[in-house]
Amino acid sequence: MGALGDRIRIHTGDITKLAVDAIVNAANSSLLGGGGVDGAIHRAAGPELVAECRMLHGCKTGDAKLTKGYRLPARYVIHTVGPVWQGGGKGEAELLASCYRRSLEIALGHNCRTVAFPAISTGIYRFPKDKATGIAVDTVTDFLQQDPLLETVTFCCFDEQVAELYRHAVAVLGEG
């Protein structure tokens, strides 16, 4: 794995505190704030964020849109809408992979070298955490292999249990 492994980091803590070029927000389709990480990002960024989000007219599941970071240490927020888990037969895995891919494409388009992701769709959208972390790591790894400009991608985990799932997914990848 070598250099690729050095470009993936796993961090337990508050994504709103990370000084990276872009943090990714697990948003709802309105982009106007909500619960969980979405609400935390909106609170930390300040009222200017929701004002800019209003002008984006929402976002489709699996896609992503960019705003400024405002009061966050991150320069940008990339809002992506993850799928709601409905048992796995409704294209949820492909939509989740698309969230990671689109977010990274947008980050690169704005010269971002460091990006941090939350565990998209694993909260109120109930995507099974083990499946979601595997999809996240696979998608990000594929992207990093094709793009040398991205320096680091951080998976920012709310708790140590989720961080452990990411560590396992990265380790499995290293064996493959």
Image (cartoon, helix red, strand yellow):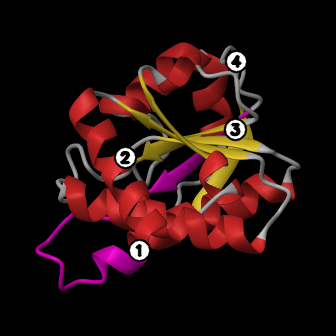
Q: Position of residue 164 (x, y in %)?
A: 28, 40
Q: Position of residue 174 (x, y in %)?
A: 47, 64
58 to 43, vertically: above or below: below
Bin the neighbour count of mark 4 within 10 Å (Cα to Cα): few under 14, some 14-19, many 20 and up: some
Q: Which mark is residue 22?
A: 3
Q: How many marks on residues?
A: 4
Contact? badges 4 and 1 (CB < 8 Å): no
Magenta stretch holds residue 170: no
Q: Nearer the viewer, mark 2 or mark 1?
A: 2
Contact? badges 4 and 3 (CB < 8 Å): no
Q: Which mark is residue 95?
A: 1
77 to 142, vertically: above or below: above
Task: Provide the residue span drawn in magenta.
Answer: 76-94
Which badge, 2 or 1, is on the more N-terminal residue? 1
According to the picture, the residue beneath numbered tag 2 turns out to be 167
Which badge, 2 or 4, is on the more N-terminal residue? 4
Marks 4/1: CA–CA distance: 28 Å
According to the picture, the residue beneath numbered tag 4 turns out to be 73
The kind of residue tagged 1 is Leu
